[in-house]
């Protein structure tokens, strides 16, 4: 069950990277480097990649656990 917590924490990191890319005006004052729109697109792409990767890893580990449980039940 540790993989559940780990993958959700990684997904949270992905979402935290998406927020400044989607809503840049509040973050421009805090992080002046975000004024360049290319930086926002990079954050967006990295956030989506991290989130999707964590979702895929979660699904793979979930399937393995289900297979292991089925073998134990037989």
Image (tube, rainbow, N blue to C red):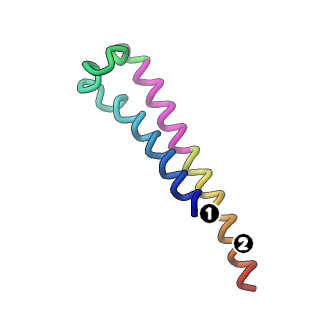
- Give the main secondary structure of the magenta stretch: helix
Kindly indicate whether the residue at mark 1 contacts the one at mark 2 (C-beta within 8 angstroms): no
Q: Distance between the residues labelled 2 and 1?
A: 10 Å
Q: Earlier in the sequence, mark 2 or mark 1?
A: 1
Report the front residue among 22 and 58: 58
Give the class, few, some or many, for how many residues have Cα within 10 Å of label 1's Cα (few <14, many ≥20).
some
Residue that carries the numbered disc 2 in the rendered image: 68
Tell me what residue is drawn at x 47 percent, y 35 percent.
47
Tell me what residue is drawn at x 72 percent, y 72 percent.
68
Residue 18 percent across, percent down from the top left = 40, 35
Report the front residue among 14 and 40: 14
Q: Is mark 1 on a helix, strand or loop?
A: helix
Tell me what residue is drawn at x 65 percent, y 64 percent.
63
| Residue segment shown in magenta | 39-52
Residue that carries the numbered disc 1 in the rendered image: 62
Tell me what residue is drawn at x 51 percent, y 56 percent.
5
Q: In this view, does 40 lie above or below 10?
A: above
**Quadrant housing the C terminus:** bottom right
Give the class, few, some or many, for how many residues have Cα within 10 Å of label 2's Cα (few <14, many ≥20).
few
| Residue 23 found in image quarter | top left
Residue 52 percent across, percent down from the top left = 54, 44
Report the front residue among 15 and 30: 30
Q: In this view, does 39 lie above or below 55?
A: above
Q: Is residue 64 above or below residue 14?
A: below
Give me the disc on residue 22. Answer: none
């Amino acid at each position: 069950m540790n993989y559940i917590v780990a993958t959700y924490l990684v997904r949270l990191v992905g979402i935290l990277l998406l927020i400044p890319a989607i809503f840049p005006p509040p973050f421009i004052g805090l992080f002046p480097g975000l004024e360049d729109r290319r930086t926002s697109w990079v954050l967006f792409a990295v956030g989506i990649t991290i989130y999707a990767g964590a979702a895929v890893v979660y699904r793979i580990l979930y399937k393995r656990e289900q297979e292991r449980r089925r073998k134990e039940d037989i």
